[in-house]
Amino acid sequence: MYTDYIKSPLGVLEIRASSEGVTHVLFTTSKKSEINTNEITHRCKQQLNEYFSGKRKTFELPLDQVGSEFQKSVWSCLIQIPFGETVSYIDIANMMDKHNAARAVGGANGRNPISIIVPCHRVIGNNGILNGYAGGIERKLWLLNHEGVELKGSIKKLKFES
């Protein structure tokens, strides 16, 4: 396994990759592993920096996702959500032709180990409400604001303190 870290506007992100692709992009409070990079972690770090600076809307990285077939199916749907758009858990279930699986979709979405690149932050409740996010709801809100998503209701734009 290869590991590197990036300081982002949302705090430190840990990037992990195999020789096949990115396996994890996770929020962390500190560097927990020794840095051991490869071309994939380098490209991931570069593309995340471009995303945060507003120069990148899509990622072009090989992924090496580990999960159940259902989880991988959900994560595959997440990758199809365009920058600056949101969908609901029900929308993902319908994309998969599993119309009654919105809760299971939510569970798989919450277990996505490749934050931002596999954009689980773009999934919201059917009623337009922001639901949980493994990195914290403030980070989800920041990411959606960064992408120009107009949110309903009284949700205000937050400045994330890293």
Image: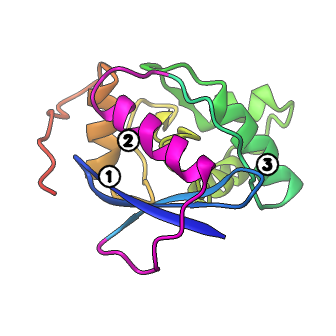
* In the depicted structure, whether residue 7 falls above or below residue 150: below
Indicate the amino acid at tag 1. Ile
Q: Residues within 10 Å of mark 2 (few under 14, many from 20)?
A: some
Q: Is residue 32 magenta?
A: yes
* In the depicted structure, whether residue 154 falls above or below residue 48: above
Q: Residues within 10 Å of mark 1 (few under 14, many from 20)?
A: some
Q: CA distance from mark 2 to mark 3?
A: 23 Å
Magenta stretch: give its range: 29-57
Residue 47: numbered disc: none
| Image quarter (top left, top right, bottom left or bottom right) of the C terminus | bottom left
2 or 3: tag closer to the N-terminus = 3
* In the depicted structure, whether residue 32 falls above or below residue 5: below
Residue 77 in the figure: left or right of residue 143: right
Read off the residue under disc 2. Answer: 130
Q: Residue at x 52, y 32 (%)?
A: 126
2 or 1: tag closer to the N-terminus = 2
In what element is the residue under mark 1? Answer: helix
Give yes or no for contact between labels 2 and 1 (Cβ–Cβ under 8 Å): yes
Give yes or no for contact between labels 3 and 1 (Cβ–Cβ under 8 Å): no
In what element is the residue under mark 3? Answer: helix
3 or 1: tag closer to the N-terminus = 3
Residue 137: numbered disc: 1
Indicate the amino acid at tag 2. Leu
Indicate the amino acid at tag 3. Lys
Q: Position of residue 148 (x, y in %)?
A: 30, 19
Read off the residue under disc 3. Answer: 72
Q: Residue at x 54, y 61 (%)?
A: 37
Q: Position of residue 134 (x, y in %)?
A: 45, 60
Q: CA distance from mark 3 to mark 1?
A: 23 Å
Give the number of the mark in front: 2 or 1.
1
Q: Is residue 35 magenta?
A: yes
Give the number of the mark in front: 3 or 1.
3
